[in-house]
Image (cartoon, grey):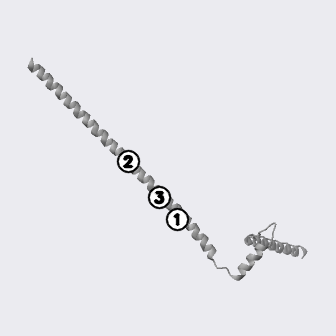
Amino acid sequence: MQAKTAQVDKKALAEKKALAEKKALAEKKAAAEKKAAAEKKAAAEKKAAADKKAAEKKALAGKQAAEDRKSRTSKKVNSRSQIDSQKKRDSRNELLTVSVSLNTGKIVAIASVGILASAILVSAMVFIAG
């Protein structure tokens, strides 16, 4: 009888030990997963911070470039005649400003067609009259 109870006790002890090992393994696995998640989160935060810093740097560079362009245009040395003409232009009060631009290629083409047509008509009149 004692042998039987000893076997049962041994079996229960083995089951307890296996259960404890299983529990310890599960805890280790959970701790490893938690650590991996924390590392992943830290890496994501680090990347976001780097992206934010890069965006700020880019914005600052764009702002500085705009300021440089602005300062360059203001530093241009205008000749005396340009300054006088700008003053005259600014002093006039105009209600409407009209800007005219011509496409000389079209004008030349139309004029050449007209000259060619007149030459043909004159030669036709001479042929008919003669």
Q: Residue at x 9, y 19 (%)?
A: 2
Q: Amino acid at mark 1?
A: Ala
Question: Quick one: SS at disc 3?
Answer: helix
Alpha carbons under labels 1 and 2: distance apart: 31 Å
- Residue 61's disc number: 1
Q: Relative to 17, does residue 61 appear above or below in the rendering?
A: below
Q: Give the image location of residue 54, x and y in percent.
A: 47, 59
Q: Give the image location of residue 24, x and y in percent.
A: 25, 36
Q: Who comes first in sequence, dot 1 or dot 2?
A: 2
Q: Residues within 10 Å of mark 1 (few under 14, many from 20)?
A: few
Q: Amino acid at mark 3?
A: Lys
Q: Residue at x 36, y 46 (%)?
A: 38
Q: Amino acid at mark 2?
A: Lys
Picture quarter with the N terminus: top left
Q: Residue at x 87, y 76 (%)?
A: 126
- Residue 40's disc number: 2
Q: Quadrant of residue 6?
A: top left
